[in-house]
Amino acid sequence: MKRIILVGKPNSGKSLLFNQLTGLRQKVANFPGVTVELKSGRFDQYQLVDFPGAYSMSTLTRDEDIAVEKINQALLDQDTSLIICNLDATRLQSSLMFGMQMQALAHQYGKALVFALNMIDEVTRFGHQIDVAGLSRDLGAPVFALSAKTLDGIAEFKTAVIQLAAEADSSNLNTVALPPLDYSVQVKQSRLLATQYGMPSSVVLKKQNAIDAFMLNNVSGGIAFLLVMFLLFQSIFTFATPLMDAVENAIGVSASFITDLTGPGMLADFLNDALFGGLGSFLVFVPQIMVLTLIIGVLEDSGYLARAALICHRPLSYFGLSGRSFIPYLSAHACAIPAILAARTIESPRKRLITMLTVPLMSCSARLPVYALLVAVLIPDTRYLGGIVNLQGVAFFGLYLFGIVTALLVSLLLSRSAVTDNEKSDMPFILELPSYRFPHWKPLIHRVLSSAKQFIYRAGPVIFAVSLGIWLLGYFPTSAGGLQDSYLGVIGQWIEPIFEPLGLDWRYGVAILMSFLAREVFVGALGTLFGIDGADENIAGLAANIQADGLTFGAGMGILLFYVVALQCVATVATLKAETGSARLVGALVFGYGMLAYLLAMLCAQFL
């Protein structure tokens, strides 16, 4: 299939343009060891490939190295018909610097190129007009003004791109030997064109600076940041509760209906205990993952995440980190693996290593079902301020905050130890602040649904396999007196002394050990265990079953802190080993976090 490639600088509306052209029918390809991500989708009879944003073809980071390498490979490919270079109409000079480099490469490789002058609605809103025909004439390439957000000019652009790609396929563009474009010349040309056609930067920055005067102020900005983070974690519990109740009720109704059809017997026991009790208990918490993805997506698309990184730079520097560490830390609340890879954007090897080693202490979405279950068991559903503030949500915030504080303390220790290298010199902290914008909801909702789908596909088979194994071991031998006399009971009682100091019996010990495959297994394993133990009259209502069983507050808090600290994800361990190149270092990290988690759980059980 012939290919059209889409390139441009970050924060220029390129991804939204890609979504509009492909209709969100896309696939994502990740490259190991970097945050580079290629998205591809069907556009008419062509494959449209969205390359990661780059400021220049002259690279500074490994991410940019891979991105530029993939762009060059695409330019060499005979199947590449056309290059779409996305320009930010509100920041024309910086976009043109990259665009002119791509134009020179297009001539060199004999490829057709078209410029998409995106965000034209923002220019119009500021009362400015861009002479598109004149800019096209001076650039020597077609330029189309459009807005991927409001869809202005999109229909005309689609038609023109298909026609230009077809013309490029039917013609033989010759490779042109051009000398490398001098960087100073490029800067001068892009500045001249931006001055002639673009709107003054002061117009764009006037409103942005007015907001930043509050958001980046030492006092008001810090308060706003803490408030945003608090609302983020509060919303995980408050906004997701109706969806969680709906899923739980649906699972309960489905379980009752199906088991009534099967009648009593082994099949009904399997459906009740392993399927609905194990896998069903896990599915109840998927809405919270969706809410987390939604809120982080809103913060990212609005332009606030870059400000948060800037706000955090000075305090993070005290702990041996960089402001850029904030992005991996925040994204780690979804999943630690891409967060570890995102640390590649940190220029300092020392700070990059410290960030990667402490990212697992951020509470990822896999911990979310564990937190939600035990918080519902231990903390009453008390609401304040007309229901806006939920005591369980405050407990959630406390758990996430505990993980962040622990990560900072570990970072401080590592930055003053010999674990990291002695490289002290750092590049200046440089960060582009994108314009404040309202998120575009269609791709954002698609991202939310996709995150839930990927989470279920990744964790679901593991949950089901563990639930099935636990059910088989707990159900047989059928001549046994009950769960305690089953194969699983014998294994559990053998390991029970390890968990007795934590105030836990063997059932919790089995669930914790099983969750070293994946943390969310804890919920499914407990659901299966309590189901086998005769709690199937309240299918998927695992919190009520645990409360009835009498879990103490100290033991429950111990489990929560254990899951905050312990490194229990095999995939995260493998990623850390690949990124650090040291199995010994990662092994010491797993052991150290495990011992700290066990000690915290024991202290909670003994003194709370």
Image (cartoon, helix red, strand yellow):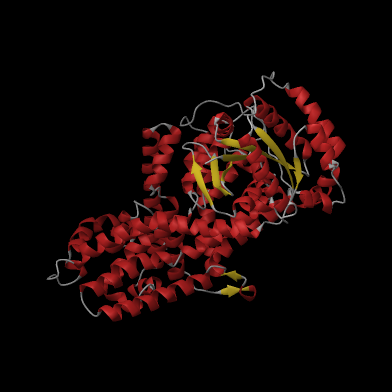
**43 lies above or below 293:** above
- Give the image quarter of residue 485: bottom left
Residue at image x 36%, y 71%? 546
Measured from the top left, where is residue 57 in percent x and y? Answer: 64, 29
Front residue of 138 and 540:
138
**In this rendering, does residue 210 appear at all?**
yes
Residue at the limit of the structure toward the front, as seen here: 170
Q: Determine whether 385 is above or below 19 in the image.
A: below
* Occupied quadrant, residue 56: top right
| Viewer-closest of 268 and 15 | 15
Q: How many marks?
A: 0
Q: Residue at x 48, y 74 (%)?
A: 246
Q: Residue furthest left?
A: 479
Q: Position of residue 423 (x, y in %)?
A: 55, 26
The residue at the point 30 percent across, 62 percent down is: 467
Percent x, y of residue 339 = 52, 44
Q: Quadrant of the C terminus?
A: bottom left
Q: Determine which quarter of the picture holds residue 549.
A: bottom left
In the image: residue 420, left or right of residue 586: right
Query: Residue 452's x, y, as percent?
Result: 48, 59
Front one among 567 and 157: 157
Say left or right for 529 vs 606: left
Please name whichever residue, 484 or 149, is drawn nearer the observer in this view of the structure.
149
Residue 7 in view, yes or no = no
- Where 313 sits versus 25, above or below? above
